[in-house]
Image: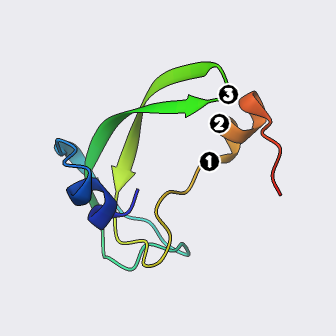
Amino acid sequence: MDKRLAAKQEFKLQKLKKLLIVKRTYNSGEAITHQVKVNMYYKNHIERMRMNVCNLGKTNIILGIPWLAIHNPEIN
């Protein structure tokens, strides 16, 4: 999740015990230091999940392959 979206929605940031260094991704920052707990709504399903917070630029959220594989959303 982009850090600006997390701030705008006033999500409570939780500091990670260990920094995550991510390479070759949209994250323009050096390391991921925090995460948030959010409710993800898809159709009639609600799921509590954790999202890492970083600098994604114009992108608000990136969903991973495991989530997409489980829920198989229709993408236009």
> Which marked residue is nearer to the observer: mark 3 or mark 2?
3
Viewer-closest of 60 and 54:
60
Q: Which residue is the site of mark 1?
A: 64
Disc 1 element: loop
Write the residue at 59% across / 49% down.
63
Q: CA distance from mark 1 to mark 2?
A: 6 Å
The reply to whether discs 3 and 2 touch (Cβ–Cβ < 8 Å) is no
The reply to whether discs 1 and 2 touch (Cβ–Cβ < 8 Å) is yes
Q: CA distance from mark 3 to mark 1?
A: 18 Å
**Which amino acid does the dot numbered 1 rest on?**
Gly
Say whether residue 35 is left or right of residue 23.
left
Disc 3 element: loop
Say whether residue 53 is left or right of residue 23.
left
Task: Say which label, 3 or 2, has the lower sequence index.
Answer: 3
Q: Which residue is the site of mark 3?
A: 43
Write the residue at 21% across / 58% down.
7
Write the residue at 37% across / 50% down.
52
Write the residue at 26% across / 50% down.
9
Task: Look at the picture and state if 18 lies above or below 32.
Answer: above
Residue 30 lies, in percent from the top left, at 30, 75
**Which amino acid does the dot numbered 2 rest on?**
Trp
**Which amino acid does the dot numbered 3 rest on?**
Lys
Residue 58 lies, in percent from the top left, at 47, 77
Residue 43 lies, in percent from the top left, at 67, 27
The reply to whether discs 3 and 1 touch (Cβ–Cβ < 8 Å) is no
As drawn, the label of residue 7 is none
The quadrant where residue 21 appears: bottom left
The quadrant where residue 48 appears: top left
As drawn, the label of residue 67 is 2
